[in-house]
Amino acid sequence: MLIKRKKGNLIPALVLIFAALVFTLIFALIFNFKYMRQVKKTTVRPLAFSGQFYPADTKELEGEVKNYLASAPAVSAKGEVKIIMVPHAGYDYSAAVAAVAYKALAGEKIKRVFLLGNSHHHYFPGVAVDDSDIWQGPFGDLKVDKAEAAALIKASSLIQVNRAVHADEHGLEVQLPFLETVFGHNFKIIPLLFGNSGGDDYETLAEVLAKELKAGDLVVVSSDMSHYPPYALANKIDRETLSLIENKDLAALSAYAEEALNQEAGEDTILCGLDGVKTTLVLADKLNLTPVVADYKNSGDTVFGDKNAVVGYGAVLFLGSEASPVGASLSEISQAAEAPLNAKQQAALLAIAKQSVETYVKDGSIPDFQVSDPRLKQIQGAFVTLTKNGDLRGCIGQIIADEALWQVVRDMAMAAATEDGRFLPVSVAELAQLSYEVSVLSPPKVISDWREIKLGRDGVIVKKGGRSGVFLPQVATETGWSLEEFLSQLCAQKAGLPSDCYKSGEAELSVFQAQVF
């Protein structure tokens, strides 16, 4: 039986359906509005220097950072690392030094990292904190500890939010690849930048940090050292700076910053993160931390650097009260001479030199080597000499090294082939005609009398003012010079000094020995 509905009965049902649709629409709009507001509120500081200071390709960067860490010498010092001072230049120049400090942190449990430096582009009073929600890292996002940022701001009017000055600052960003590699992403960051306004702002920040630091916190101070003096002068200035840091002599460091700037030609600054370093010295005093110099080199020590104008890089660890340095210190960066290399080790280094030159000349790439022999991983200076049909074709080396012997041989071989100013770069056509000689060096020792030098045994370094020169021990044997001729040529030919400078008593003479093969 068919039942016929009245038309009027449909109206309530339609009203209910319409109301449900309206309610659903309103609910969706409210939800999406709240969601969009939430997304909009999330602030991110994006990477700004990927592909400039470090590789943009993630896999390439990961391999490079891990290689730097694996190759870095271990620092033999007891105690928990609470603060590190590390450089922030392009990785080709400074990452090997930074890696020494980061390697010392392996195994430590870090919950928060205070990133501290001086702005390179802005001048403003006090200290700027970035309170973004996230800093983008090359391997993943890093959360900012916004609660700690707020606590710092509350603790001192000196500290203010200023995201803009962080946006174009590389000094803190270049630390992220190392931090992520060593600690993963289970930590938060608090980015802080000084505005270069001078004064005692660092004392205020140190006072605040001393109260805020907890177990599991790390302070990373980002600073390069000497800017643009010649190689030898940079070594002199930077070693003095590191000595003052190691002795926690804040007053002397402040005075030396002015002295070096005013008196040393070509010196723009002894520390571009000077306020950050001063902060660490105050903290070191308050927290009873012991500074230990872990490493030093400058851009002139790399195959890419110009020794006429260099930038210095230092790594310093600030250790807890149990610290008892038994290894690396400023005076021990130049390592003691090791036992002579055996035939197998000599052959390995010669093969590294040859392969490095051939690879670099052919395609411009720097080869890596899997070196397991502990002896070849010891820090030691070396020269690599290239000859072609018996004639010199290039010779460059490092007397005082701060990296593994095999790395020194690799880098100096490439430099001898392409950077010896006396010759054009080696061409592919010449490779088959080259012979290789490696000289592994003992650390130099200063002597008081030139007559102490023994020809054929001693290599000699002469220094006076900003000039220096070096002859390897075999130079005397190959030339047949007398001692006076040897030293006169060293002064005039290599150092650009008067030929009798070694007799004046004003020039510093150092000797070293070499194992040549």
Image (spheres, grey):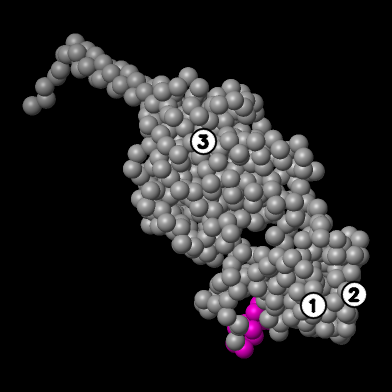
Q: Callout 2: 10 Å neighbours few (<14), some, many (20+)?
A: some
Q: Callout 1: 10 Å neighbours few (<14), some, many (20+)?
A: many
- The residue carrying mark 1 is 386
- Name which residue type carries label 1: Leu
Residue 345 located within the stretch drawn in magenta: yes
When the figure is inspected, residue 303 is found, relative to residue 44, above or below; the finding is below
- The residue carrying mark 3 is 279
Residue at image position (61%, 39%) is 253
Residue 280 placement (x, y as % from top left) = 50, 39
- Name which residue type carries label 2: Glu
Q: Which marked residue is nearer to the observer: mark 2 or mark 3?
A: 2
Q: Which marked residue is nearer to the observer: mark 2 or mark 1?
A: 2
- The residue carrying mark 2 is 485
Secondary structure of residue under mark 1: strand
Q: Main secondary structure of the magenta part?
A: helix
Among numbered discs 2 and 3, the one appearing first in the sequence:
3
